[in-house]
């Protein structure tokens, strides 16, 4: 009998690796041996494969079956290898014709149906990049897999139908079987995405301006103020101000959500920036990523190219907040576990919201506040200095006055502000394209103090703040980035002294109010 050979994909984080599946049928007593570092769910594939093949009309050989997943040193996990192993075994038994360079990614049900798996989008992307464009998936994964350009994807609902395509005897196959509850192929269209409107926010002119600047330059934002001032309302409206994702960004974001979602949930191409708002009781693994075995992405990676909003930020564990410092600088999370290392993109906009003290009444004169100075310091100290140094805009949000409530309908809506943001982003892209950058928040210090260096007369107030120790070197660069964003919103070729002053004010507003 020939040696059966097929191909599949092993995902480690968002990176996919080609796996060659070999199958051999020996002459000894019945057995099924699976080699190549399979995890528990993959080891269970032996029983799923036997039942699925029998109920599809092509029972497996009664001799010893040995299946090997190459490279053997790469850990294999999940049920997505079921179909590749089955096709390799059927080829070894001469029940089907050679499958060539076709890649198989699907789980098998005991009745012979092909079930969808999680992470099909990054798996198909990896297969195409490796030079294997012919891919077979479950029918329920077809729409998602078809999002990948240059992929020749076919979807099947049952193993019998697939075996027929590869030359199995139709008289033996259970072709009359159709799943009782066929999986829907889903909708591969563009996700619409709707966000609350800025017109709903009454007053708060300074906060609205800060939100617009944050959206225009992709800057991080801290909103400090009493309960009910509108901090959460403002943060929830930030994603609506951001431009649509480009083609590359859309595929990147959709791949992450494909890896995180339920296998049966159809994944659409995400064109709008994601918005993640985990509860303050969330663990480090939930926000950063992790878990047993190979680490999985957390909320920070799901917010990639979008917004990560941490409401009541001082209520989070300090180690969780400090763990965000690395992705705020690098835009990537590298998670190490005993079973392996996974790297996930995490270039998000961080929005923090905090009360001024545990009781929330320390704003203004603070006459009703019952917190001691020590309680206030301990409360705000949960957001460490190194973390806050990475937050560009730090704003004090005051309570809304009665006069602001009387101006309902007078505020600008999201569409109006978003047009200005899009114009500022376009100017940034034109200026920064030569450096391979897209937004002001990404500009490194060497460029800010090199090719984009401003005259000393413009940066005098900033230089003085650095000398006095009011700003760190990182803070100096972040104020410069803010100033460039203000200039882009004002249609100026470069920041002037007023832009520097406004940027420094946005950076230090919360600290001055405290």
Image (cartoon, helix red, strand yellow):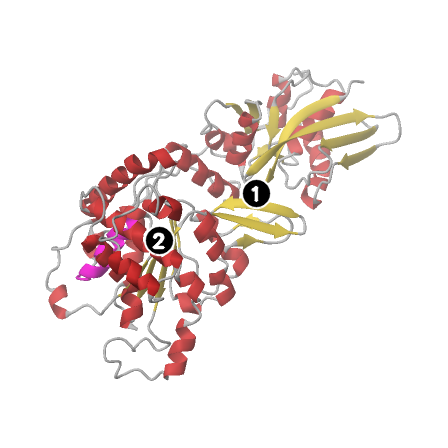
Task: Give the answer, above or below, for where 425 lies relative to 471.
Answer: above
**Is the stretch drawn in magenta largely helix, strand or loop?**
helix
In the rendering, at what x and y percent does residue 391 appear?
A: 37, 58
Question: Taking 30 as reference, is 465 left or right?
Answer: left
Query: Mark 1 or mark 2: which comes first in sequence?
Result: 1
Q: For this view, does 34 lie left or right of residue 241?
A: right
**For residue 83, which quarter of the picture?**
top right
The residue stretch that appears in magenta: 202-215
The question of residue 287 being in magenta is answered with no
Mark 2 residue crowding within 10 angstroms, few (<14) / some (14–19) / many (20+): many
**Dot in front, 1 or 2:** 2
In the picture provided, is 176 more to the left or to the right than 304? right
19 to 273, vertically: above or below: above
Residue 124: percent from left, percent from top: 53, 30
> Which residue matches tag 2?
477
Q: Is mark 1 on a helix, strand or loop?
A: loop
Res 463 visible: yes
Count of labels in the image = 2
């Amino acid at each position: 009998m020939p040696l059966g050979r097929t191909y599949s994909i092993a995902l480690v984080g968002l990176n996919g690796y080609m796996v060659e599946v070999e199958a051999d049928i020996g002459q000894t007593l019945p057995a099924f041996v699976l080699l190549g570092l399979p995890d528990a769910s993959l080891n269970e594939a032996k029983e799923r494969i036997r039942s699925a093949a029998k109920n599809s009309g092509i029972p497996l050989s009664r001799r010893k079956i040995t299946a090997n997943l190459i490279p053997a040193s790469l850990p294999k996990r999940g049920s997505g290898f079921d179909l590749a192993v089955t096709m390799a075994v059927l080829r070894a038994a001469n029940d089907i014709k050679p499958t060539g360079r076709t890649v198989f990614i699907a789980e098998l049900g005991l009745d012979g149906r092909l079930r969808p798996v999680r992470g099909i989008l990054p798996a198909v992307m990896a297969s195409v990049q490796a030079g294997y464009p012919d891919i077979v998936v479950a029918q329920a994964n077809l729409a998602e897999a078809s999002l990948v350009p240059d992929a020749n994807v076919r979807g099947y609902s049952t193993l019998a139908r697939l075996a027929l395509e590869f030359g199995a005897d139709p008289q033996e196959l259970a072709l009359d079987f159709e799943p009782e509850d066929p999986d829907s192929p889903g909708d591969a269209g563009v996700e619409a995405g709707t966000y609350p409107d800025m017109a709903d926010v009454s007053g708060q002119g300074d906060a609205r301006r800060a939100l617009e600047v944050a959206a225009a330059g992709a800057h991080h934002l801290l909103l400090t103020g009493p309960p009910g001032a509108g901090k959460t309302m403002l943060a929830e409206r930030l994603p609506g101000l951001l431009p649509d994702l480009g083609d590359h960004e859309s595929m990147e974001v959709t791949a992450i959500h494909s890896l995180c979602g339920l296998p049966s949930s159809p994944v659409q191409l995400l064109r709008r920036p994601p918005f993640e708002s985990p509860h303050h009781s969330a663990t480090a693994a939930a926000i950063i990523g992790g878990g047993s075995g190979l680490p999985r992405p957390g909320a920070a990676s799901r917010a990639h190219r979008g917004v990560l909003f941490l409401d009541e930020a001082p209520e989070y564990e300090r180690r969780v907040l400090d763990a965000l410092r690395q992705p705020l600088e690098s835009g990537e999370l590298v998670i190490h576990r005993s079973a392996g290392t996974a790297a996930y993109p995490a270039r998000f906009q961080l929005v923090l919201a905090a009360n001024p003290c545990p009781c929330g009444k320390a704003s203004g004169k603070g006459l009703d506040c019952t917190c001691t100075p020590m309680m206030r310091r301990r409360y705000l100290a949960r957001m460490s200095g190194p973390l806050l140094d990475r937050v560009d805009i730090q704003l004090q949000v005051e309570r809304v006055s009665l006069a602001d409530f009387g101006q309902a309908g007078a505020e600008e809506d999201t569409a109006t502000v978003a047009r200005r943001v899009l114009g500022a982003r376009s100017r940034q892209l034109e200026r920064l394209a030569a450096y391979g950058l897209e937004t002001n928040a990404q500009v490194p210090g060497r460029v800010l103090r090199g090719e984009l260096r401003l005259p000393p007369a413009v940066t005098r107030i900033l230089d003085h703040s650095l000398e006095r120790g009011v700003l760190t070197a990182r803070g100096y660069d972040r104020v410069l980035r803010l100033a460039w964003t203000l200039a882009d919103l004002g249609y100026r070729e470069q920041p002037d002294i007023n832009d520097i002053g406004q940027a420094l004010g946005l950076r230090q507003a919360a600290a001055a109010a405290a």
